[in-house]
Every structure is written in C-alpha cells, then in structure tokens.
Amino acid sequence: MQSFGFRRLGDAPRATPFWTQANALLIKNLTYQKRNLRRNISLISFPIILCSLLAAIQTFVDKNLDNPDLNCGCACVDKNGDGKCEKVCGIEYSSPMQAPNCPNPSPPRWAPVLQMPAPNFRAVRTDFFPYTDLPNESCRESASCPVTMLFTGKNRSLGNILAGNMVPSSLFWNSSDAMNAASLNVLGSEKKPTTGGYVDSTFFSSLPLYYILRQCVKSPTVSIPVSLFSLTNAQKVACVQGLQLWRNSSSQVNDEIYRGYINGNPEGKINEILSGFDFLNSDRNNFNVTIWYNSSYKASAGSPNVLLRVPRLVNLVSNGYLKFMLGAGTEMPFQFVKEMPKHETKTQIDFSSNLGALFFTWVILQPFPVILTSLVSEKQQKLRIMMKMHGLGDGPYWMISYAYFLTVYAVYMFCFVMFGSVIGLDFFTMNDYGIQLVFYLLFINVLVSVAFLMAGMFSDVKTAEVSAYIGVFGTGLLGGFLFQFFIEDPSFPHGWLILMELYPGFMLYRGLYEFAFFSVTGKIIGTSGMQWGDLTDSTNGMGEILIIMLFEWIVVLLIAYYIDQVLSSGKHPLFFLQRHDKKTTSNNLVLERQRSKVVVQIDKHDVREEREKVERLLNERHPGHGVICDHLKKVYPGRDGNPEKFAVRGLSLAIDRGECFGMLGPNGAGKTSFISMMIGLTKPTAGTAFVEGLDIRTEMNAVYESMGVCPQHDLLWDNLTGREHLLFYGRLKSLKGSALIQAVEESLKEVNLFKGGVADKQAGMYSGGCLYG
C-alpha cells in the first residue's frame, strides 16, 4: 500500500537554498563512498596490479636482453704495443647481430637498390593474367623472366620516350671501384628490405643482385667486393631484362598490379609487377607523375619500419624527363644511400609503451561502468525522484553528482599515473606531465558526461553494467586490432580518422598511442618523450585529440542535461525557449485540457457525475480543487507476444483541497499505476492530471514542492543507515545543528528505531518490520 498527499502551494515551506541542497547531497555522497571502501580499493588495485605486472615483465626482459651476444661486440686489444690489452668495443669486433647496437660515427655508403620480384613470382601470361605482351610462363623454369614496369599517361609518345630513358641498354662497370660503378646502374634485389641502412644485408646475401637492361644478350655477371669490419663478401650481380609495357589508363595499371597479389586473383598466385608510372598531363612545360610501388613490406602494428626502396624509382623517372628535356647526356646521379651517424644503443623492448595503448585503455575505462551503474541505480530504484520529492533540485543534483564522480575518477587516475611513475614505467616518466594532466583531465570529463548521457538511455542496472563492460573491453580490442592500423596508414582519409576519434574510446586510444610512440622513440634515440612543442607536429595527433575532447565534453554535457530535463523532469522539449515566471500560484492558473482519444464506457451513475464534474472544473478559470484528473490513462506494452495491458482506462477524478481520499480496488485494478503517475514515477500514456493547477506531465518539479509520499516499497540506499537517511533529508529541509539532531532523534523514536543501535545499522540489513513498520 502506498499513499500521497499535497498541501497548497501558498502553504508550502520556503524552498531550500541551492547551496544547502548541494551540501546535503555532498555529505550523503561522501558517506556513501565511505561505505564502499572495499569496492574502491578493488577498483584502484586493478591499475596497480597491471602496472606491477608490466614492471615485472619489463625487469625480466631487460635482464635477459642485457646479454653480451646482443650488445656491441668487444675484444681485448693491445693498442700501445706494450703487451697489455685493453677492452675495446666496436663494429669491427661485432657479429652481424651485435653490429646494429654499436656506435657508428661514419656509416658506410651503399648503392641504391630497387625492390624486385623473385624470379618465380615475376609477371607472366596466365589464365587470370591474360595480357598478351607479357612473357610465357615457361620462363619461370629457367629463372629468366624479365621484370615488368607499366606505363600510362595522356601522351603515349611522350610516355614511350620517358620510359625508354629510364632503363639503360648496357652495363657501366669499373671493377676497381665497384660500389660507385654499381650506383650508376639500375640495381634491384628480391631480398626483403632491412630496417636500417647501417648494414645493408642486400650486399651480404646469398641471393644475387640484378642490374636491369633493356636486353640481356651476352651480358656478364659481375661482383661487388664488400668489406665492412669483420664482414666480407663478393656479391654477385646478374643481368635481368626490364620489360616496359604501355597501358591505356591508370585503372588498367592499378587492376593489373592488384591481380598480381596473392589475394587479388582466384587462383591465389603471385604475378608481381616491379612498378607502375602514370605520366598524367606531362609535357615540356609540366612534369607530373604517379608511381606505384610494392608496399607489402610496410611495417604492421608492433613491427619496426623497413626501407621500401622508393627513392630509386623517383630518381629513374626524374632522369628520364631530364634526358627528354636536355639530352641523353644529362643525368642526376643517385650515388649512394647512407644512415645518419649514431651512438651506441642497447637491445631493449619497452613493454609498457608497446602495450600501453591497449592495456591502459582498459585501465582508464574501468571506472566508467561503476559511474554509469550508480546513476542508473538511482533511477531504477526511484531514489532520484525520492530526492526530488524531498526538495532536491536539478541544479544541486547535477553539480554535486558531476563533481563527485569527477573527483572519484580524478583520484583513480592520480593513483594510476603516480604508481606507474614510481615504478619507473617509461610511458609515464618520459612524457611531459603537464600534457598528461590536460589529456587525462579532459578525457575523464568527457567520460563522466557520457555516463550522464547514457544513464538516460538505460532503466535497468544489469543491462547498463553488462553493456558498459562490453564497451570497455571491446574498445580496447577494436583500438589495438583495427583503429591503430588506420592511424598508421597514411592513405587512410584524415576526415574519417577524426570522425572515428569522436567516439570516446578511440579518442582515448589515440592519445595513449601518441604517448607510447613518443616514449618508445625517445628511449631509442636518447631524448625525452612528448613535450608541448611536439603538439605542433602535423603527424602528432595529440593536439587534435585535445581540441576534440574539449568540444565534445561541452556538447555531450549539454545534451545529457537536456535529455535529463525532458525525460526525467518531464519538461517540454523546447523548455529552454519558454518564458519562466518567478512563482506560479493556484490563484492565477488556467487549466489547459489535453485532447485525448480515450473512449470510456460510462455505465454507472456516480462515474458519469464525476466525469461531468471534471468537465465543468476544467472550464472554470479558478477551480477550487487540489487534484483534477482528466482521462488519465496508462498502458503497458505487450511482451513475448502478449497484448497490451491497460492499467488505467481514462480515469477522471476531482479531489477537494483538504479532502482525505482513499482508492480501493482488487489486485490489478490500477491503484499503484495511478499513484505512480501522480507522484512522477511513471508517465501517463494519455490524459493528464493537475495538482494545484500544475500539470504532472510538464511541471512535476513544482508539484514536488507540495507533495508528501509514503511509497509502497522502500526507496533507500542499502549502504546508508536509517539515521543517515534522516540526516540527509533533514538537511534538504534546511535543518541544521541541534534542530537537525533533535528532529532525527524524534523521528527515530516515533518508529521505534532509536534504541538498540538499530538506527545506525545499514538499511540493507533491516528486517521487513523495520522498513515498513
């Protein structure tokens, strides 16, 4: 059984000041937080455990990588000729595995090389590759297939000239200076590209190098003697024909290259083209070209970058145009490639940075389900409405609840960052703490705003909790195995990337990815991580993310507040455009009747009289009744194939001021549904009711100022005691000091909860007699 009552607005107590309401809710929230100490410790322990695990793994890996076989090689050398040896380290004392870590003040020069298809993968004529100008497939048996370059453009005659200028007709060789001579030819190799140019493994390989000619008739096989400290080799260089074929459009070139990949044809075979060139609108006044190259060796997520050997292609086509313009004797030689000088490095793997974007996404999102379920729980258990009934306005509720959850989240993040820094994770220590502060502060504001927004979309705590955790873990996985590829792909449209970053999870992942990238890079090259000056770097997405977060925080917060006002407070969708009067009293109200399609069969005389009475009152300008219901209707939608359930069928009712009205009826008659609509727990399907002239559909907040409710079920926080409930509601009524204590104790005595410490037990431990007695 439940009951409610109203007092005239003129008799209602003066509204509690804003800051008094805010203070009452803040004290209640802090008390509630203290009761949830165990959950808070569990929440904070998650990032601590994860950081500790990463630190332990990092220590183990560092210990195993600190191995002489993985660092620069050393030897005992008699430098002064006095028979005493000294430990000297350098490339000359290192194995191929050790050499990349040695200091290299003067890196060697290497002839530029093209990335070339292996002989058994070079383009030939097949059923799925029916181009008649390609060689027969039989050339693969003798490893004599040419390498194919495709050309197109608007001017075919010019294209043929430029293509002919790109590939030489004879070998230029000087055995006394083989490396320099090699650079004057067009070299290519099928060996996979290396990650750096300090030691080009192409020149220390069992696979041959090739020089490309128009025809390989009686072309010799030569060798390049290579000596680099302890590494020596005579690299063989053989001839391969460069087949130059014209295509009518760039789409044909693109289609032919695509079909040559293993996934581009139905037979799953490789038929690889060396490169493609589109001369576009080039002429004597303009030189524009598009180059296709093999990017299949490009680094994937988590793997190091490789040298794709593109510069030589650019040099070839540039020389072809120079010869066309200035004569065959004109050339822009590409003499060598070499790395920058470097200091000594050590083999190292930074787990916290390499895995940080994925794992830390999960860590940082962990409080989100907690915040969301707390907000939904207050709505599901009708605690939010109960607080409104006791005088808590929307302004204090939003301010304190938002600040409360933001503070909890900020404490969580502070513990996370500080603990990660204390144990020495480079992800935290190398990046500027000011940038981290701004990033994390903006993000938790965005996420708290999103929690308030999503709370309006859920009515069940379990559904909200499961959905939130699926979102948390799904975000990490999608970020690590999908979104990161888009970040690293320069061809992916930037606009689409920004659109994806509007999703808070990807926004977080992008920021963490940038922190991880700068910490790893800084560790490798011996500099700091991300600094404020790095935000201007066009390749650094952090500045973009900070701007997106700032705007998204403001927009989402405003939308969340708007939805809450419309859905929870029952305001008109355009309430922000309506004029607000200071105070509305029952003396100047005009009741506006809602047009309803409800058809009610009236058989009884007293029901007909009540309806006529309501009709008459609605037409009066100053009705003298406290409650008027007009065709109030509540229909619950059908579920599992069942039809709709009519709980209240067009109820019309008028109750005088001061009248004590009781509603009787069997189970299912609609008593609870009627009262739930009158006190704002549910919204009418049709019709409306007026309390002192205030419409329950749009003015429920004003109705609460004159309402008192005894609910059918207990609307209590399980973790708060009976005394704490009364203290909270007493503060909402502007009681304080001794008056508040006295009122609370008197109320406890009236319901026999004062003695025996019952008042200081948590409400979740109360028996049914304590709750309803």
Image (cartoon, helix red, strand yellow):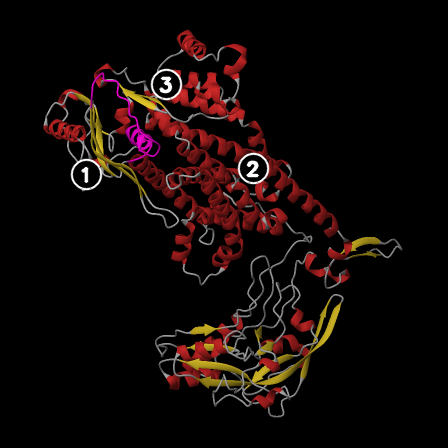
- Give the distance between the C-alpha atoms of the residues marked 3 and 2, in whole angstroms: 38 Å
User: Which label sits in the foreground, 1 or 2?
Assistant: 1
- Residue 660 magenta-drawn? yes
* Front-most of residues 256 and 243: 256
Q: Dot 2, how many residues are within 10 Å of its Cα: few (below 14), some (14-19), or many (20+)?
A: many
What residue type is disc 2 on? Val
Quarter of the image for residue 268 reads bottom right
Circle 3: element type = helix
Q: Is residue 323 visible?
A: no
Judging by the rendered image, the residue that carries numbered circle 3 is 732
Residue 588 covered by magenta stretch: no
Q: Pointer 1: residues within 10 angstroms few (<14), some, or many (20+)?
A: few
Residue 185 lies in what quarter of the image?
bottom right
* Residue 129 in sight in this render: yes
Q: Which residue is mark 2?
A: 417
- Where is mark 1, residue-wise? 601
Q: State left or right for residue 296 relative to residue 696.
A: right
Determine whether 280 is above or below 461 in the image: below
Magenta segment, prevailing SS (helix, strand or loop): loop
Disc 1 secondary structure class: loop
Magenta stretch bounds: 655-683
Which residue appears at 54% of the width and 28% of the height?
36
**N-terminal-most mark, 1 or 2:** 2
Image quadrant for the N terminus?
top left
Quick one: SS at disc 2? helix
Q: Earlier in the sequence, mark 3 or mark 2?
A: 2
Picture coordinates of residue 564 (x, y %)? 33, 36
Labels 3 and 1: the sequence-earlier one: 1
